[in-house]
């Protein structure tokens, strides 16, 4: 099968060839962490195999700048600094 340009229309024969290719794949063909039972996505931040909800917040720029400076100074991510601050509540 040859590479296709996105502007080209796929013929029925090409579509059939791609379908045959993908239908013949085995779990091992997909690489580590790509298929199978269990949790997908980023690892849990708490107990293993438990969901870690994503939380978003808007901050005034000066407050974000302060948070970013703290993260950089301590070699951590902004998220890690926020988690620590929230745990202290």
Image (cartoon, grey):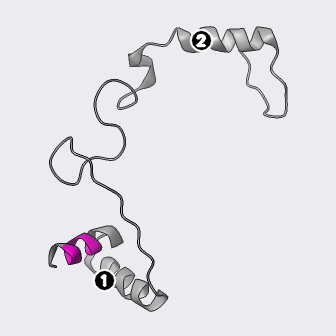
Per the model, the C-alpha gap separating discs 1 and 2 is: 50 Å
Tell me the quarter of the image containing the C terminus.
bottom left
Secondary structure character of the magenta stretch overall:
helix
Look at the picture and state if 68 lies above or below 48.
below
**Magenta-highlighted residues:** 81-86
Q: Which of 43 and 51 is in front in this view?
A: 51
Q: Can residue 75 be seen in this view?
A: no
What is the crowding at mark 1: few (fewer than 14 residues within 10 Å), some, or many (at least 20)?
some
Q: Nearer the viewer, residue 33 or 73?
A: 33
Image x and y of residue 67, in percent:
35, 82
- Which residue was labeled with disc 1? 70
Look at the picture and state if 50 lies above or below 69.
above
| Residue at image location 30% in from the left, 36% down from the top | 39
- Which residue was labeled with disc 2? 21
Q: Which residue is at the far bottom?
A: 62
What is the crowding at mark 2: few (fewer than 14 residues within 10 Å), some, or many (at least 20)?
few
Q: Nearer the viewer, residue 9 or 2?
A: 9
């Amino acid at each position: 099968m040859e590479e296709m340009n996105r502007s080209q229309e796929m013929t029925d024969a090409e579509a059939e060839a791609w379908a045959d290719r993908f239908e013949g794949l085995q779990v091992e063909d997909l690489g580590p962490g790509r298929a199978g039972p269990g949790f997908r996505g980023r690892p849990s931040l708490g107990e293993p195999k438990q969901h870690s909800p994503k939380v978003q917040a808007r901050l005034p720029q000066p407050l974000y700048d302060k948070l970013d400076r703290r993260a950089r100074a301590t070699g951590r991510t902004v998220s890690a600094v926020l988690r620590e601050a929230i745990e202290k509540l």
